[in-house]
Amino acid sequence: MSTTTDNAATGTPVAKSIPPNHTLYVNNLNGKVKKQQLKKSLYNLFISYGRVIGIIAMKGVKMRGQAFIVFDDIQNSTSALRSLQGIMFYGKPMRLSYANRDSDAIRFSKQQIDEKTAALAATSQPEPKQRKEKPRIPPPPLQPPPDRTLHEQHIALMNSEEVNRAANAVAAAEAELQELPLRDRTRRIQSVIAAQTTLVGSAVPMMTEVQPNSTLFVTNLPNETTREALEKLFHQFPGYNDVRLVPGREGIAFIDFDNDSGAASAKDGLNGFQISATNAISVSFANK
């Protein structure tokens, strides 16, 4: 069905406006992302704006890079459309609009239902008679797994939550060091060295957790991340104030909020968020 009408006076095509509805049409998605990972990331992104009752994403040639997000309320779908328009998602800016009609999403859902019904019908056919097989000798019982080696224990230690917090503390201290005047750096270098020593040996359990505050420290950002992209991502949380990129240091940023509760909400909502195909950001409280 055509989406344009002719202006009677000028003969110029005029785009037909689509009325707000529960379903958002999203395109310009990264077609290289696996379907299940794409749906999970879309859910984590859109759930901040209201209850999501359905996400439809297919990998067919005609539907690659497209998805439908179905909300339970038109107000929620409208809020998501306005806030997320153009946000960088897996390295590409998302384009959002209302679906032509809610039934668009239903039509594609029916296609999936038909495929599942056909698969169920195929499995319900009577099975051919099977030949009697000779009894098999059962395999010997499995031996209990050996104790983990020292190498495996070391890997588990380096992936522990304490070590990750220590690494974030070191990165935050180093970033803040770059912003200090030269005369103040010597004293701060000592604190950085002390933080680094907690990454090895028995010092790991002694790491103290950073207390909640109004500033967040974000790491593992893509090098091409812009201030505008981070503003779109964090401004959806209450109390958002500002984004601070560190000159000469790619992949990290500081996010300021008016209060601790807003920062905590953003930390819980975005820690581990897959901002690109290769980068899941880490969000923690900054050292004060």
Image (spheres, helix red, strand yellow):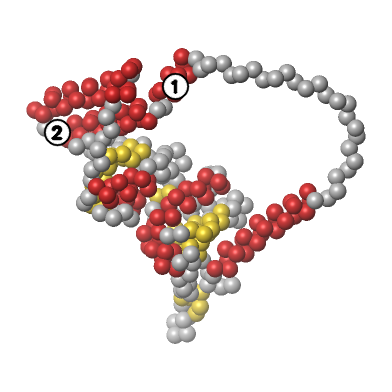
Query: Visible in this render: residue 242?
Result: no
- Disc 2 or disc 1, which is closer to the eye? 1
| Helix, strand or loop under label 1 | helix
Q: In the rendering, at what x and y percent does residue 156 appear?
A: 44, 23
Q: CA distance from mark 2 to mark 1?
A: 35 Å
- The residue drawn where x is 31% and y is 54% is 237
Which percent across, then down, holds residue 114? 70, 58
Residue under circle 1?
A: 155
Q: Residue at x 72, y 56 (%)?
A: 117
| Circle nearer the N terminus (2, 1) | 1
Nearer-the-camera pick, 13 or 119: 119
Q: Residue at x 78, y 54 (%)?
A: 121
At 70% from the left and 20% from the top, the residue drawn is 141
- Amino acid type of the residue that numbered disc 2 sits on in the rendered structure: Leu
Q: Secondary structure at mark 2?
A: loop
Q: Quadrant of the C terminus?
A: top left
* Picture quarter with the N terminus: bottom right
Residue 247: x and y, percent? Answer: 23, 38
Instruction: Say which amino acid is labelled 1.
Output: Ile
**Mark 1 surroundings: few (<14), some (14-19) or many (≥20) residues within 10 A:** few
Mark 2, other Cα within 10 Å: few <14 / some 14–19 / many ≥20: few
* Disc marking residue 180: 2
Apparent side of residue 232 relative to residue 246 in the rendered image (left or right): right
Q: Residue 265, how many percent across, how many down?
A: 32, 49
Badge number at residue 174: none
Q: Is residue 39 visible?
A: yes
Instruction: Judge by depth and name the residue closer to the eye, 283 or 174.
Output: 283
Residue 125 placement, left or right of 91:
right
Farthest-out residue, bottom: 9
